[in-house]
Amino acid sequence: MNHNLSFSDFSKSVLQEIDKYSLDNSIISIFIEIPRIDLIDIYEDLLEDYSFSSFWEDNNQISYLALGKCESLNYFGTNKFKFAKKFNDQIFKKLITINLYSKRIFFPKLIYFFSFDDKKIKSASYKSIPSFEAVLPKFLIIKDKKSTYISMNIKLLNKKNISVLIEEFWNLRKRILSKKTFNSSYKSDKINHDSFNDLLGQSRNVLSKKVVRGIKLINDDILQKIVIGSRLIFKANKDLNLIKILKKLRINQPNSCKYVWKRNSQDITFGASPEKLFSFNKNLLILEAVAGTAPSNLDKNILLKSQKDLLEHNFVKDYLFESLHHLNINEYKIEKIKVIQFGDVSHLYTEINSEIESICPFLLLEYLHPSPAVCGVPKKEALFWINNIEVYDRGNYASPIGWIDSRGNSDFRVAIRGARFINNEIEITAGSGIVKGSIAENEIEEINLKLLTLAKEILS
């Protein structure tokens, strides 16, 4: 790792490497190692410079900051995973990685955000989102437990274009290296409980009717499980302080994956997901069953002994087993069920893992989404009733968000415990799983607890 490298030497080396390749419809990915940095601090410095950006912080795997777009696709339509795979294959087929200064191999990444469902958008057009968004970032600052890199993806058009972009890459590296990072701490200030409780109260009657309908579907044996959601919308009194929110989420939600998808300054989705849909890295496939909920201030043994919550959790586990069998993955390890705390909310958690040679991430997406953790059982019928009962389109709520690299490694989270800031309004959505034994009042309190947990991070 040579931090004293000169721009002229760097530019010359990159151009010499590029000369080895055809300029015809190729993408060059260059990267260089940099010192360890705090990605949130860097994001604070660069947030306003790029219309599109995405942030991902997973303490157990990788974290990254994506800035700008080299290639992208917004797809509206059905069969989203099929078309996402087609785009994925096209991009990686023409992508060439240049490694000049590192002993480790860097694999470029495409990042994705899917919609929950392919159904027609019910909301107003300005709130509509694509079936999926795929982005090959212009810049990607990425860190794992060993190293930190900055990379740039360049479309090979002409030499002048390349030289300008190399200089832009160098200037960004220089700006990052000169940034004096700091460790700010934000305590959770007290939210205006009265105003937020008023909002919860106003929505209570509507939510109660939804939950009662869900319970009736279960008691009438039409469904075995359904996840019913509630969405609160309120005006933002001032500009969204995204960096402050991320720092508070880092402190208050340490076991969650913090995520941001910023389409522009007036359309930002963010949150702290407790649920991994799947990850595949170094031949290890990991799935997570996260279902069954209680306030974190209760004894965790209460959750472990709750028949209702265990039933809800087992629906998710069984679905994951069934999906693995469909994918001809019949050897896997099931870890012991436990309770994990995610801020004010705790969940039953079971990890399932399998050592396999390879797997198509889009097949996993197609089989695993939506799981009973965010949908229901049977899936097709539950989706129908969710669309019938919920008066809003879920959009990105409870949908897959994540990344795939050029070697097929991947990591996708379920976009829950999050919010969308759009045109000076904030939308917060949360749901609860209804099964045999569900009590309407308890389900309403669970949903409100999840809504309040995130609202504390945004409004204080």
Image (spheres, rainbow, N blue to C red):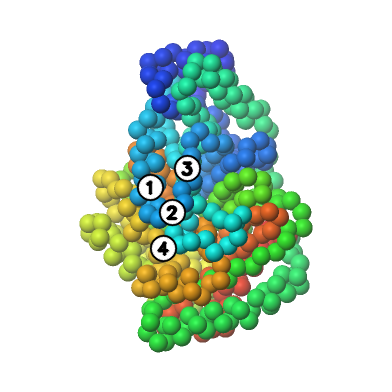
Residue 153 x, y percent position in the rendering:
48, 30
Circle 2 SS class: loop
Cα gap from disc 2 to disc 4, whole angstroms: 17 Å
Task: From the viewer's side, name the closer residue of 385 and 45.
Answer: 385
* Dot 3 and dot 4 residues touching (CB under 8 Å): no
What residue sits right under mark 4 in the picture?
Answer: 370
Label 2, on which residue? 77
- Looking at the rendered structure, the kind of residue marked 2 is Gly
Q: Residue at x 57, y 19 (%)?
A: 164
* Alpha-carbon span between mark 3 and mark 1: 10 Å
Quadrant for residue 65, please give it: top right
Q: Amino acid at mark 3?
A: Leu
Residue closer to the observer: 216 or 443: 216
Residue 448 occupies quadrant: bottom right
Helix, strand or loop status at disc 1: helix
Q: Residue at x 47, y 83 (%)?
A: 215
- Nearer to us of marks 2 and 4 is 2
Residue wearing tag 1: 83
